[in-house]
Image (cartoon, rainbow, N blue to C red):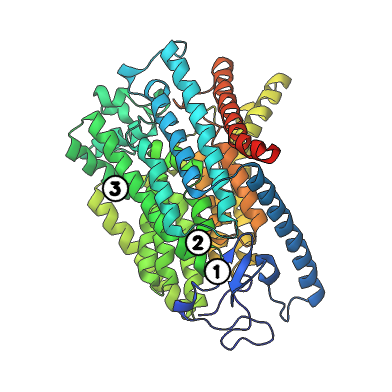
Amino acid sequence: MRVEPGSGRTGQLGGRSGRPGPVHDSDRGVGVLSPRFGQRTAGRSRPAALIATAPDSHVGHAQAAARQARCRSAVTRAGHHDSVLTKAFPIDLRRCQVLGLAGTACLALGGETAGALPARELLAPSSVHAVLGLVGVYFGLVLLTAAWILLGTLVRGADPPAPRALVLVLAVWAAPLLIAPPLFSRDVYSYLAQGAMVDAHLDVYAHGPARLGGPLADEVAPLWRNTGAPYGPVFLAVAAALSGLTRGALSAGLLGMRCVAIAGVALMTAALPRLARHSGADPAAALWLGALNPLVLLHLVAGAHNDAIMLGLLGVGLVAALGRRPVLGAVLVTLAALVKAPAALGLVAVVVLSLRAGRPPVRTLLSTAAATAVTTVAATAVAGTGYGWIAALDTPVSAHNWALTSLLGRATRALLDGLGSDLAPWAVPVWHALGLAVTAVALVVIWWRLRRRPVYALGLSLATVAAFGPALRPWYALWGLFLIAAAAPDTLIRHRTAAVAGVLALAVLPDGDPADSGRLILAVCGGALAVVVLWQAHLAAQAPTALGRTA
């Protein structure tokens, strides 16, 4: 197997003229890229950007030099930023661990009164306990985000923590959320109701949870009570099995669904370092961005979203394909797509990886198609749900959804209504169709230009689907972020992706309901209080140093 241009070591093991040579599987973990210090080879470090792309017959030396200069500037800026931050806030791994644990503990405590609680435990938003809970959640969220940012400076430092140490940090941060009520969404109640419907042999694609009736259906958000499930048979089979085990007990069902999400996060965490090594990235940096970012903890762990199991299966499927087991990779990626449909794009990456490994194109396409078809038929037969999930892919989106095309559609509809036009009802559907067309064109361009970097191309493709699709939720950003974390070619892209994750972490209230001005003010107050506490802690830590200097 050859190292991809832009991701590996040049001139090794037979490489000629600065072009990458063949590398054995056992060698892939050597000389990985660090986002700040680049590739470590022969006891010295060079900026990753300077060796990211070797000039070949298609790229002139002048163009390569210009790219290197731009990347050298980005590396210098990142190093300066990290140096300033480290001097201002003396940190180590243990302090990051404790600060993040304090953040998730506050999230869990605040969620007890302000989270997506069962209907019988919901409090009035104006009640004292609900107000304190909301302030506490955003206080903890800012602490967690600060811990993640500071941990990032350690990962980019001269002596970054090992991947095992970062996995331990993830476990410590996630621990309080395991016993917290659902946070930031009520989707987990829909999962439980849909699983109970499958267990009761009701058509979950033709009917919403209202057909089930009973206390469990009452927990589902009103918008989705009469809407069919948009999920594939693999997830519904898991939800049905969980329903049978818990016999409708709500607390046991919530805990079971969170365990399923934790299993998905564990698969993601296991896959990230391997995908990073293949892509020439630092495994520690990949774990920091792809597994430790607040979106994973807030929405996959605390929210128990099924995106966790989708991404986990997708990640291990890509690892299998990289390990020269394309059929197993196709099976696992198909299972991921039978949880949520966007993962089907991973089959393109499996095919590209197989072709790059030297397999005949016809044989590759036939084997992938056969593995996909057999897996789909078998999973659907086991789940007993039928093929209604195909028609359910166009499940209607929320009227208040803030996807780009939905926002533009609503604005256009309001304008046309003001003008008295009969075209107003068509505004949202037309914008949604335009978004899908833009997505299709973007996918073709991405795969054509990045066909030599299939993991990175897949990450950008999933990010494009989320950005231009008809529905958008903060956790949808994890579709692309997960793989971009493992395969991004330079530090600047990672920084921008991290910034997006940090902003989206603040975008949803803990009960999952639309925000109003009063609760937004409370949320801002909770975050501001956390900033004040962090600043005072910083000043207290600096005081002994200042006294020592004056003495």
Report the residue at 40% width, 62% height from top: 317
Label 3 sits on what residue type? Gly
Residue at the image position 58 percent from the left and 21 percent from the top: 525
Mark 3 and mark 1 residues within 8 Å of each other at the beta carbon: no
Mark 1 Cα shell of 10 Å, populated few (<14), some (14-19), many (≥20): many
Question: x and y percent of residue 241 in the render?
Answer: 22, 44
Q: SS of the residue at dot 3?
A: loop
Question: Could you classify mark 3 by the number of other residues whose Cα lies within 10 Å: few (under 14), some (14-19), or many (20 or more)?
Answer: some
Circle 2 packing at 10 Å, graded few (<14), some (14-19), many (20+), is many
Give the structural element (helix, strand or loop) at label 1.
loop
Between residues 347 and 353, which one lies in front from this camera angle? 353
Tell me the distance, in whole angstroms, between the alpha carbons under discs 3 and 2. Answer: 40 Å
Is residue 382 left or right of 296 when viewed as pictured?
left
* Mark earlier in primary sequence (3, 1): 1
Q: Which residue is mark 1?
A: 32
Considering every residue shown, the one lying at the far right of the view is 62
Q: How many marks?
A: 3
Seen in the picture, residue 329 relative to 543 is either above or below; the reply is: below
Q: Which mark is residue 283?
A: 2
Q: Earlier in the sequence, mark 1 or mark 2?
A: 1
**Marker disc for residue 386:** 3
Of circles 3 and 1, the one toward us is 1
Which label's residue is closer to the chain start, 3 or 2?
2
376 displayed left or right of 107: left
In x, y percent, where is residue 418? 71, 19
Left or right: 323 as drawn, with respect to 547: left
Say which amino acid is labelled 2: Pro
Residue 159 visible in the picture: yes
